[in-house]
Image (tube, grey):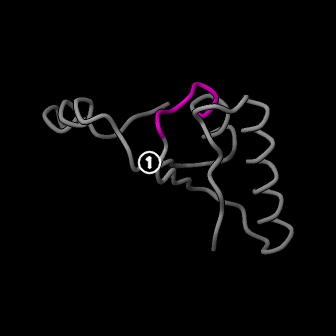
Amino acid sequence: MGDCMHDEATTHFIGMIDQTTLGHSFLKSELDFIPKIGWQLDPFGHSSTQASLLTSEAGFNALYFGRIDYQDLKQRQNTQNCEGIW
C-alpha cells in the first residue's frame, strides 16, 4: 500500500494539512483503510505543524522518521531515550 509524504521544508501548513487529508480520504474511500502509523522516510527536519497537527491529531498512534541529526541521535542513544512524545 502506498502513500505520499508532504514536504516539510518549504510548504505552508495549509498545504501539509490538505495533502494529508487528501491521502487519508483516498485510503478510506478506495481501500476502506485508516492509517494509524506514519513514516517519514527522508525529511529534512520536522515542522511544528507536523508535531502539533499531523501526528496524533491526524489519528496516528506512532510516527517514524528516517533522518535525525547525528548529534541528537548519539545523545538519545547514550541516554537510552530514543522515543519521543510530540
**Quadrant location of the N terminus?**
bottom right
Q: Residue furthest left?
A: 78
Does residue 7 show up magenta in the picture? no
Against 13, is 58 above or below? Answer: below
- The reply, left or right, for residue 39 in relation to residue 59 is left
| Residue at position x 83%, y 58% in the image | 25
- Tally of numbered tags: 1
At numbered mark 1, what does the secondary structure look like: helix, strand or loop?
A: strand
Crowding near the residue tagged with mark 1, few <14, some 14–19, many ≥20 C-alpha atoms within 10 Å:
few
Q: 38 or 34: which is nearer to us? A: 38
| Residue at position x 22%, y 30% in the image | 71
Against 37, is 9 above or below? Answer: above
Measured from the top left, where is residue 38 in percent x and y?
56, 53
Q: Residue furthest right?
A: 29
Against 56, is 29 above or below? Answer: below
- The reply, left or right, for residue 79 in relation to residue 60 is left
Q: 27 or 2: which is nearer to us? A: 2
Residue 37, image quadrant: bottom right
Residue 56, image quadrant: top right
Measured from the top left, where is residue 32 in percent x and y?
79, 71
- The reply, left or right, for residue 68 in relation to residue 58 is left
The boundaries of the magenta stretch are: 44-50
- The reply, left or right, for residue 8 in relation to residue 78 is right
Looking at the rendered structure, the kind of residue marked 1 is Phe
| Residue at position x 31%, y 34% in the image | 69
For label 1, the residue is 65
